Each structure stands twice: as C-alpha cells, then as structure tokens.
Amino acid sequence: MASHFKAAERLKSLKRSGIRRFFAAAQEIPNVINLSVGEPDFVPPKYTLESGWQASLEGKTHYAPTNGIPELREALVQKAYGDYGIKYDPDSEVLVTVGGTEAIFLALLGLVNPGDEVLVPNPGFVCYEPGVLLAGGVPVSVPLLEGNGFKPSIDDVTSLITNKSRVMILNYPNNPTGTVLSREEIAALAKIAVERDLIVISDEVYEKIVYDDAEHYCLAAFPGMRERTLVVNSFSKTYAMTGLRIGYVYGPKELISPIWLVHQYLVACVDTFAQYAALAALKGPQDFVSDMVTEFDKRRRFVFRRLNEIEGFSCVLPKGAFYVFPNIKSFKMPSEEFAQLLLKEAHVATVPGSAFGSYGEGYIRISYAAAYDQLEEALNRVEKTVKKLKSTS
Ligand SMILES: Cc1ncc(COP(=O)(O)O)c(C=O)c1O
C-alpha cells in the first residue's frame, strides 16, 4: 500500500547532492578510483587523536558548553588575531560547530527571512542553495565563468543586488573551481557589501590550501567588513579531520547570537572528543599542513598537465583547494552523462559540474586528494575511455 506520508513542503525543491550520489554509485563499481569526494586522503597527526582520546579517558565525555570548550575558543581567537589581525571575543564572537556545514546552515537559518535574496556562487558548494531554500530565502546565482577565471564579475554582482538582497555567500579558495581571489578582487566585493549593506557568509574552509604566489585574505579583515561578516572555517580540510565533524565560525556578537540560538536547539554542542583533538591540532606544529599542501601541489601540477594532454579536455590551473574543474564541452555531452561514462567505462568517479549549479554544466570536478599513483592510473584510464569516445563520434 502506498504511504500517504510525504516530505514537508519545504523540501520540495531539494535534490540529493550530486557528490553523494556519485560517491555512492562509486561504491558499487569494482576497482574504482574515487576522485569524487572532497576530503584529504591524509590522516590527522597522531597526537591530535591521542589528545582527544586522553581527554575522553579523563572523563571528558559529557556535553560541552554550547559554544565550545573555553580552551578551544581561546585558541581560535588567538588564531584569528595571528592569521588575520582580527580580535574576536572568545565568549560571544566565536562558535564551535559541527563542521563548516553546520555553520553555513546556522548562518542561513539564523539570518535569512522568507523572501530575502541570497547571492550564491554558481557553480558553488552543494550546501549553499539548499540552505537558502530551507531558510525560506531566494537563492540568486552569481555566475562564475571560465572566461573570467571563474571569478565573479563586479558588474554581475552589482546588477544582481536588489532591495531584497540580504546575504552574499563567498567561498575562497573555491570549491569546485580551485579559484583564489587577489586582495584587490576581495576588496572590490567587500566594498559592494558595505555599500549595499549586505551580511556576508565567507566560507574560508580551504584557507590554508593555496599554491604558487596565491594568498588567502580573510574577508572580515577588509574595511567595514568585521561587523557584517561571518567567517566559516573547519578542521576538515586543514587537518584532514572530515570525520570528526568540527568547524567554527567567527563574527560580531550581533550575528553570532542568532545563530548560537539555532545551534543550541539543533545540536546542543559539538562532540567533546573532537574539540580536544582540534585544540591539539591548533596548538601543535603546523608542518602537517604544509607537508600536505606540498603533496597536493605536486598532484595538482600532474593532473593539470595530464588533463591538458588528453584531447578534448581543457583546464585552468587552479590556485587553491584540491580540485580541478576541466572544461568538457568538446565532448558534446551533459556533464552528468560524461561523469557516468567515466564511472562505468573507466571506473573513475568524478562529479558532474552540473551538481554545483547550472553554470557548472560543461565541466567535471576532479578531486586530486588521492595518492599520486592512483591519479596516474585514473588519468590513463580516462584517456583510454575518451580516445574511444572520440574515435566513435
Ligand atoms: C566550500 C566548502 N565549505 C564547507 C564545507 C564543509 O566541510 P565540513 O562540514 O566538513 O567542515 C566543504 C566540504 O566539502 C566545502 O567544500
């Protein structure tokens, strides 16, 4: 008998994440090389996990304070001062969250009113648009076009702002394109946010993963931005702690208070073990991070070179994160179909660009957070499949 139970109306426009869909499909394929998920293939330094474990053995297995253990908040405040020169109050201006994901949802649920417009990068990280929709807001796509280096055009941003615009989401270094913005480019976006009185959710989870001459600039450090910016960050990418589910958000008290309220009722607090492990990560030597980035850089160059050698792909050299976003338009196939073909024929899992929004069509995302020899094998397989495709078309 068909069930009469139906999902709530507010889920009407939500689809299953394209990343998760390809990740799940990849599990079914024998001998698959999985380049679909966005997580480092490293394990966190042993002492960080030992620190979490030690705290648990000492009985720190109870609910933590809603906003995070004081030692971690203090260390996070010091990090913000050291890295960006911004002073935050540890009691009211930082919140420890269940990954950056929770922080993004809290920000949207806590600050967006029904009908408010939210500027969302397109292509962009898969959580933004569903978060806006669940909050009752209206996502407004900011196109990130290859012709503009996958950077937002200031003219586009300006013309998309209306009197209903309330929030702008920015994400640098960017997922899925790997783009990093210069100081001047960030300053131009900051200026618009100030002039048009927007709140900015600045997703900076890849801040430490930048290459060549690229630098990360925290949006909140620009004039007029501290009071209107929620800086979302995470231990997932920097310390390869995706499974520990720990992130954080900085902001002025006026913006942190409402999202704290949502956090309190949603999760009560973050896993105590993870908070002690994260604290050890912040306080310990940072060579783990630089070694990981050096290794990613080697892989980035390799994947970029190899993709550009294969007929049909063209690829911009990304300056951050651990993704490449090659153009596949010459194959004259929707990205979903192309990614399916790579999965079924080459046994290589990628993500169709369309999973990141309409402007991602014509691209696929390849994560190079996989061992070098796996990447070599994956690209050989892709080359073979693509050659066959070209010869039959
Ligand atoms: C741009 C971006 N923001 C936020 C996240 C959330 O990561 P987590 O919830 O593991 O901190 C991700 C994960 O892939 C991401 O790519």
Image: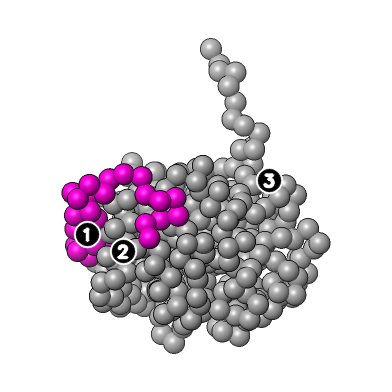
**Nearest the eye: 280 or 6:** 280
Whether the residues at callouts 2 and 1 have beta carbons within 8 Å, the answer is yes
Q: Amino acid at mark 2?
A: Leu
How far apart in space, not on screen, are marks 2 and 3 (Cα)?
Answer: 35 Å
Q: Is residue 271 left or right of residue 127?
A: left
Q: Amino acid at mark 1?
A: Ser
Secondary structure of residue under mark 1: helix
How far apart in space, not on screen, are marks 2 and 1 (Cα)?
Answer: 9 Å
Q: How packed is label 2: few (under 14 Cα within 10 Å), some, or many (20 or more)?
A: many
Q: Amino acid at mark 3?
A: Gly
Find the magenta span and give its range. Answer: 42-70
Residue drawn 53% across the image and 12% down it: 1
Q: Is residue 70 left or right of residue 55?
A: right
The x, y position of residue 325, in whole percent, is 49, 67
In the depicted structure, whether residue 77 falls above or below residue 259? below
Secondary structure of residue under mark 2: helix
Label whose residue precedes the other's in the sequence (2 or 1): 1
Residue drawn 58% across the image and 21% down it: 5
Q: Is mark 3 within 8 Å of ligand 1?
A: no
> For residue 51, which numbered disc appears in the image?
1
